[in-house]
Image: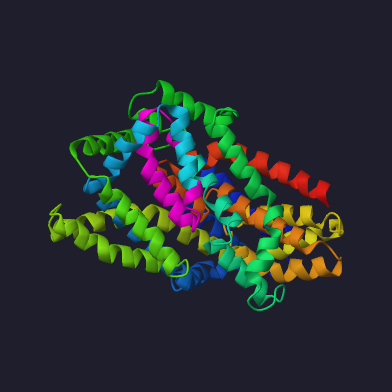
Amino acid sequence: MSEPTALSLIPPVVVLVLAVWLRRPILALVLGAISGLMMISPTSALHSFSEISLKVMQDETIGWLILVCGSFGALIALLVRTGGAQAFGRASIKLAKGRRSSLLMTCVLGLVIFIDDYLNALTVGETMKRVTDRFKVSREMLAYIVDSTAAPVCVLVPLSTWAVFFGGLLENNGIAESGQGITVYMSAIPYMFYAWLSVVLVLLVAAGVVPAIGPMRKAEMLAQHGSAGAMHVSEFSPEHNYAMKAVEAEHKSAEDVEGKLYNFLVPLLLLVGFTLYFDIDVWMGMLATMALVVPFYLVQGLMPLAEMLEQMMDGFKTMLPAIGTVIAAFIFKEVCDQLQLSLFVVESLKPFMTAQLLPAMVFLSMAVLAFATGSSWGIFAVTIPIVMPLAYALDANIPLVIGALMSASAFGSQACFYSDSTVLAAQGSGCNLISHAITQLPYALIAAGLTFVGFILIA
């Protein structure tokens, strides 16, 4: 398309409608991408889809994602099979005396693992779900807490993958001098309102100060009054019976395995430590961790090497739905880029962008884009060269504008139905993806609304 038009909004609307209606996010994303390609050129849509999908699969980020998520699944499978996860659950239950304390423990763990949102989402959910299950907390509530302490927390900590990535973007676009990207990023942390509000809100929800609302209330009622299996599957899940059997099998296997607490804590501490050691590189951290964990388990005679490798392969397979969703989201983003969705949204809001309104308008436009495309990082690599020169031209408060950009990024990561963070939070918590997305959306919108007002007031 030569000029961006309102028609570029059609594919995101198609995806959101189909995702809620069909409860099949991968199918919704594929159909949304195809609808966009049909708009560009009906005769070459299939050829274009083939080219884009191959381009996405050759992307270094996708390769990294497949390796990291798959290896997370392999490690989690070992933690469960050796009984380490169950031992942690038993130890945690001694500290968690009830529903509220189990949720607050989940929040604290989410705040502690601040290095990377992938590491956070997969680790915290898998670690705490057996504890929250015991107190009849819905998996939807667990996934919401995990998601709210993933990207929002990583955004606020300068020692995270988010800070490294966005600090690099600021340097590459001339907003910060070489080597000063993190410093400029840190100056904007006080203005990352959405991240601050999300963390405060989730703590209030976990403490019971803010009640469960909307779809989350229904999910919590099912958890409180449902059976041992049904309490983890809300009415939004199309695989109700299947999920009940899966959860029951999970708990049965947990009861059959006696494990040692150190077999859970040692791998996780190694993973966090190695990730920090390798300059916040989660994949290098995972490689080093697995290189030590496998012999560590073998020396104890917990299982033969052949069985361990089989468990790791099974764990890798459990991550395929999450990997598939993120790959489909990347394909969809490429189509949105061809439709110039980003340029249309920014151009549409330019008339309202004064120096005073710019931060609020930047947050609104970038939040819409991040929510529509499911891209919290890629969309900003494209739009920062558009937004920041406008901020300088209007003599706007630069840290405030950067704070607005990061707030929008955190919102998109948490709220979008098919963003990587949302997918992995649901995966780690053992929750249906659409159930998680729908139940947490009201809380995300509350924080986003307050953020928008905050940027208007402070400017």
Prevalent SS, magenta region: helix
Question: Is 66 placed left or right of 191 in the picture?
Answer: left
Question: Is 146 placed left or right of 252 in the picture?
Answer: right
Which stretch appears magenta? 111-140
Q: Does the magenta segment cover residue 41?
A: no
* Res 386 quadrant in image: bottom right
Q: Quadrant of the N terminus?
A: bottom right
Coloring basis for residues: rainbow
Any part of residue 339 in sight: no
Taking the spot 46% from the left edge, 31% from the top edge, the residue there is 101
Q: Does the magenta segment cover residue 133?
A: yes
Taking the spot 15% from the left edge, 59% from the top edge, the residue there is 299
Q: Nearer the viewer, residue 332 or 165?
A: 165
Residue 134 in picture, x, y percent from top left: 35, 29
Residue 271 in picture, x, y percent from top left: 37, 59
Any part of residue 425 in sight: yes
Q: Is residue 235 above or below residue 125?
A: above
* Res 44 quadrant in image: bottom right
Question: Is 68 placed left or right of 220 in the picture?
Answer: left
How many marks on residues?
Answer: 0
Q: Nearer the viewer, residue 348 or 410?
A: 410
Taking the spot 83% from the left edge, 52% from the top edge, the residue there is 459
